Image (spheres, rainbow, N blue to C red):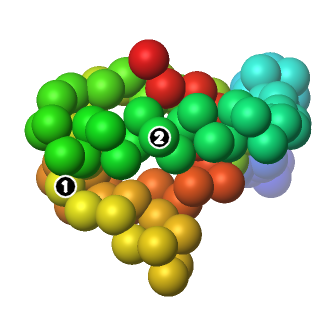
Amino acid sequence: MNDRGMIKWLPFNSVISTNYILQELNEQKKKVHLPILSEEQKFYIEKKIINAYYTQEKIKIKYFYNGVIYQNDYFVKKINAIKKEIILNDSFKLNFQQIIDIN
């Protein structure tokens, strides 16, 4: 009689890979497209960033990264107008185009 070895475990392997595929599909459903901002909204965000930089107050930034919208409180440490990015606390760089809203 021949031993089947690892062949008997193959059905469980397919269950694990199916579960992985279902998790990826659920993550893709959560992803959104980058919202389009008007010129007035961009101007408002720019003014709030400049104001927060000079007053050194904490602002709540809502930004877009990899299809997901994040929101957190930050201090603006530096503004780089040439690269169009801001450097926040903990050396976190954020591009102006990723910012959606500021409170």
Is residue 57 found left or right of 8 in the rendered image? left
User: Helix or strand or loop: what does disc 1 sit on?
Assistant: strand
Q: Which mark is residue 28?
A: none
Decide which of 56, 8 is in the foreground and name it: 56
Image point (47%, 40%), residue name: 47
Q: CA distance from mark 2 to mark 1?
A: 15 Å
Residue type at mark 1?
Lys
Residue type, numbered disc 2: Lys
x, y percent for residue 51: 31, 39
Q: 101 or 54, which is in the foreground?
A: 54
Q: In this rendering, is residue 36 above or below 26?
A: below
Q: Residues within 10 Å of mark 2 (few under 14, many from 20)?
A: few
Q: Determine the residue positioned at 27% across, 37% down.
A: 52
User: In the picture shown, does residue 88 fall above or below 85?
Assistant: above
Q: Which residue corresponds to the image point at 51% horizontal and 79% vertical from the top-left?
A: 83
* Image position, residue 29 (x, y; %): 86, 23
Residue 47's mark? 2
Q: Determine whether label 2 and label 1 are within 8 Å by CB.
A: no
